[in-house]
Amino acid sequence: MPVMINLTSAEHGGSSMSCGTGDHSNCGVDCDCGCPYTGMEEKGRVEMIAEVERRYPDEWLAFVIPPSEDDYAPERGMLVVHSPNDEEVWAAVQRITFNQVVHVYFNGSLDAYMEWAGVEQAA
């Protein structure tokens, strides 16, 4: 499985070794548990999404979006996994702590996506 970042420890952008090990019911923009929601920018894991898209054409991408970004139209994020196989990406995303804003999408042509979805296109 192409998990790029260990999503259950401080290595995935958190700032504390306790990240991912306890009760995260109070996580959010100002929590101090060390989760990536508060630590990913400090560790330099956030980058421009457009740059990442150029590196991984025709692949499924999953980003955790930092609190400073628009949740619906982010320009920056932390890439946590990429793969041509959507099932691998979704399996990795299941390991992300619940309080993260995550964007998962296919970074390819509409035709390729429609083929994946099994939708016949009009000629």
Image: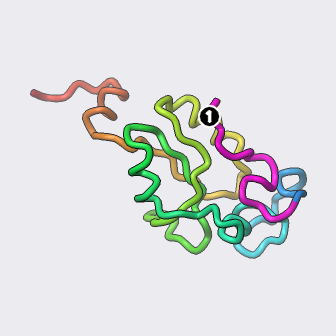
Q: Nearer the viewer, residue 73 or 84?
A: 84
- On the image, the x and y values in percent for residue 86 come to 50, 32
| Magenta stretch, residue numbers | 1-16
- On the image, the x and y values in percent for residue 61 come to 50, 44
In the image, is residue 61 above or below residue 68? Answer: above
Residue on which the image places disc 1: 2
* Mark 1: amino acid: Pro
Compared across the picture, whether 5 is left or right of 90 comes to: right
> Would you say residue 3 sits in the magenta stretch?
yes
**Which element type, helix, strand or loop, lies under badge 1?**
loop
Compared across the picture, whether 86 is left or right of 67 comes to: left
Q: Nearer the viewer, residue 120 or 92?
A: 92
In the image, is residue 77 above or below residue 60? Answer: below
Q: Quadrant of the C terminus?
A: top left
- On the image, the x and y values in percent for residue 34 come to 81, 64
Q: Quadrant of the N terminus?
A: top right
Residue that sits furthest to the front in the current view? 55
> Would you say residue 8 sits in the magenta stretch?
yes
Compared across the picture, whether 31 is left or right of 42 comes to: right
Name the main secondary structure of what is drawn in magenta.
loop
**Badge 1 density bin: few <14, some 14–19, many ≥20, Cα 10 Å:** few
